[in-house]
Image: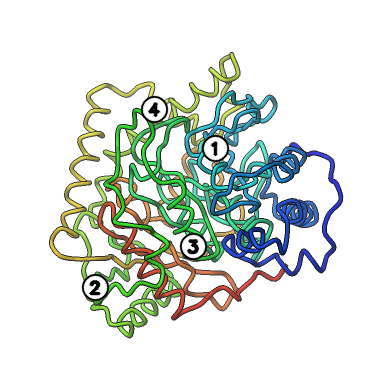
Amino acid sequence: MSDESSGASQTGSSQDESRWWDATTVAEKVAAGEVSAAEMTEAAIARIESGDAELNAVVIRWFDHAREVAASDLPDGPFRGVPFLLKDLWIQYAGQGRTDGNVAMAANPPISSVDSVLVGRFKRAGLVTLGRSASPEMGTLPVTETVAHGATRNPWNTDYVPGGSSGGAAAAVAAGFVPIAHASDGGGSIRIPASCCGLVGLKTSQGRISMQGHGIETGLGVDFCVSRSVRDSARLLDAVQGPGVGDSIIAPPPHGSYVDEVGRDPGSLRIGLLDYHPQGGGLHDDCIAAVRGAAATLERLGHHVADSHPATLDDASFTSRFMAMWAAGRRVGLTSFEKALGRALTEEEVEPQNWAQAQFADQMTASQYADALSAVAEYRRATQQWWADGWDLLLTPTLAEPPPRIGEMLARPDDPMAGMARAGEVVPFTPPFNTSGQPAISLPLYWADSGLPIGVQLVAGYGREDVLFAVAAQLEEAMPWADRHPPL
């Protein structure tokens, strides 16, 4: 773990006062002169230094750099002076390093010479980045445990995972280190940790935010954030949405400001309900209770909820066709590591599931890869047709079970893909919408008797984040979560 010396911090009482403010509140108080960007930065640093030994959420620390930024003439953006974390995966921040969760990269983190487009937008929004949050190597697994950095733990109960791959970001926001953090999602990696940690997690439409400078531009992954409130996610999307030069996928322009959707009456919507595992697997009672409770609330809010979902979600054969594309991504990722390090990697320097997939990709033919691309296109069109046929939203659990325990998804010596197989049992509901390109949001609407949060997912038609924000805000008011905090 990289660290820098600490400076003067706020008193404990000042930290406690601001710890659970959302990012909008922090920005409003900075703008009003009630607090300063420097004070908010010191408060966040103090929380990380006092609490992260237990959670292991912040694996690279730029505290002195953050102090310099906070003391500078910050841009007058919507999040001016708000402490922030960048995920330790692909995205570039000029003058700073990253490890992508890899042990060899962690030993010698390459320093970026430029900002990714999204990082430039984060800076213009006024966010003050303190460092990088933990991610599994290449973001492959829905847990955050690596040889490079160890296990990141859930602040609600440290015996359990915070999810992944944006597990460090979610643990840090849930623990009150920062009010909002960068996250990314190639198969559920924003929504999964949001569910595990009791946060708002929006996966935007493909092409809503530029992926320039993020490494692999497959069209499946998106970058955005995890947050404590619907309004924070809406406000940030207003600030960072839009294409970059040369983007291959560009979402249609928004209908207006996303913040204006928060509190807007969306009218009576037609919402499909999926409250069982579509491919015959298990679904935990807590997840069933969570999604049915959300459905009942939506009915009380005036929406029409009925059992229905896209038939593509029932197709278990899709995964095998898609895996050729996923494995190719692992090979491209390892190649990018080798380019950054200037040497070849050994098997001992790569997590077993990623090495195995890269080896599979090396044996793959061009026709197999082309078939995977064709499968994605077929799946995308067939899935989106359900919305074209007149449905507004799909309601599902975010996960098939509560957060797993630490260590459940580790590779075994005799089976490097054991963790991936276990992951498939936990996350049947999130990957389909990376493939279809649609926006989906996880909301913290239920807590199990164990004290662990359980997320519920809403999925909208392509490009319709506005609908998600309007309905998510309704649920936030009807089933509030702002006063729920982990027992730190």
Label 4 to label 2: alpha-carbon separation = 45 Å
**Residue drawn where x is 36% and y is 78% of the image:** 292
Label at residue 216: none
Q: Are marks 1 and 2 in contact (CB under 8 Å)?
A: no
Q: In the figure, residue 256 lies in which quadrant?
A: bottom left
Mark 3 vs mark 1: in front = 3
Dot 3: element: strand
In the image, is 158 to the left or to the right of 219?
Answer: right
Which residue is labeled 3 in the image?
200
Q: Earlier in the sequence, mark 3 or mark 4?
A: 3
Picture quarter with the C terminus:
bottom right
Numbered disc 2: secondary structure:
loop
Residue at the disc numbered 2: 269
Q: Which mark is residue 360?
A: 4
Q: Mark 2 or 3 closer to N-term?
A: 3
- In the picture, the quarter occupied by the N terminus is top right
Q: Residues within 10 Å of mark 3 (few under 14, many from 20)?
A: many
| Mark toward the start of the polypeptide (1 vs 2) | 1
Up-down relation of residue 484 to residue 337 (above or below): below
Q: Residue at x 61, y 50 (%)?
A: 168
The amino acid type found where label 1 is placed reads Leu
Q: Residue placed farthest to the left in the image?
A: 389
The residue to which callout 1 is attached is 89
